Amino acid sequence: KKVKQTTYGNRGMTLEEDLNITNKYYRDHEIALIHKKPTPLQIVNVEYPKRSAAKITEAYFKKPSTTDYNGVYKGKYIDFEAKETQNKTALPMQNFHDHQIEHMRQVKQHNGIAFIIVKFSNVNEVYFLDSEFLLQYWWEQINGGRKSIPKEVFENKGYLIKNSYRPRLDYIQIIDKIYL
Amino acid sequence: KKVKQTTYGNRGMTLEEDLNITNKYYRDHEIALIHKKPTPLQIVNVEYPKRSAAKITEAYFKKPSTTDYNGVYKGKYIDFEAKETQNKTALPMQNFHDHQIEHMRQVKQHNGIAFIIVKFSNVNEVYFLDSEFLLQYWWEQINGGRKSIPKEVFENKGYLIKNSYRPRLDYIQIIDKIYL
Ligand SMILES: [Mg+2]
Ligand SMILES: [Mg+2]
């Protein structure tokens, strides 16, 4: 894997890259232990060539049954999903699968900390929003309501995560403030 | 995926199958929320056929950087690795990668609950052992000590998880007893 040259506040970085760098920072500095889960695949065929590694020759992407990131901070279970949108005014609900929503509902029920981190790419703003709001809008959508979460919800009920040098997206700071 | 016919106490079930069924039971009964992580793969090539799903045509298995299972129980972060051995007297340390050991060390450091579930297949016995003992034996091995954890350690310092109908391997009961 090539190491990309990055500059501070680089707009070219994806949210996932920023979060992976942030999580590595948290791990290296023993602040929190949070990993991105591997992408779930349905493996259909594997070849076992002599004297070399098993080679998967047919596989398909599966819909994830959980969120992308989880881990532990001060003994607490942390769970979140990250989404990036080009939309300027709202986050379309189609960014989520039923399974992910249900998973977050269950995390809350078991007293875990569940939230989403959403990047509005056009304005380069990243927000932290407790999953409570996602669940509420999901529920409304099912009952014929709007099919997206307005950006104002992120601005008023969520928290802007400022880009910084290290850690790049310091979301743990927000966890400290609102849950602990 | 075919649904296998299973009978109570079936010796033909793998530990992983038993744990997946147990975790599903915990989820369905809202006892705990614990999932097996997807197998990490290095994807090298993907084809995008018209009108059908993206097909991965070349991928390789990667060494996992974490353990297999994690989740939340009563707000607490739970993390474990499951291993099955044919060995009658000990669990060889070669069953673990450096990364997994380091991951469990970090989980403990962040006050998460970390343990291993080990099945001695020959006698069909499944044990729960806190990761403290694994870390201790790992450390001794690095310093020239024995390369396995004796079965007596599981018997004396761990907990036998009895096979039952539902849940199949009730390890949460042990968590309740020893950590909470
Ligand atoms: Mg995602
Ligand atoms: Mg394993």
Image (spheres, coloured by chain):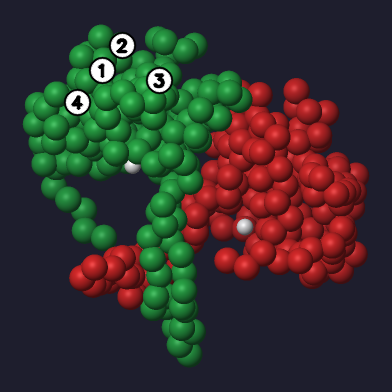
Chain colours: A red, B green
Q: Any atom of ligand 2 within 8 Å of the CB at mark 3?
A: no
Q: Which part of the image, by quadrant, shows the N terminus of chain A? A: bottom right
Q: Position of residue B67 (x, y in %)?
A: 43, 39
Name the residue that disc number 4 marks: B90
* Residue B51's disc number: none
Query: CB of residue at label 4: within 8 Å of ligand 2?
Result: no
Position of residue B103 relative to residue A59, above or below, is above
Q: Is mark 1 within 8 Å of ligand 2?
A: no
The disc, 3 or 2, on the residue closer to the chain's N-terminal end is 3
Q: Position of residue A95 (x, y in %)?
A: 65, 62
Distance between the Cα atoms at labels 1 and 2?
6 Å
Q: What residue do we see at 34% from left, 74% from top?
A: A58
Foreground tag (1 vs 3): 3
Which mark is drawn over residue B157?
Answer: 2
Give the foreground label among 4 and 1: 4
> Is residue B5 found left or right of A27 in the rendered image?
left
Q: Nearer the viewer, residue A55 or A40?
A: A55
The quarter in which the C terminus of chain A is drawn is: top right
Are discs 3 and 2 located on one and the same chain? yes
Residue B147 shows in the view? yes
Are the residues tagged 1 and 2 within 8 Å (C-beta)? Answer: yes
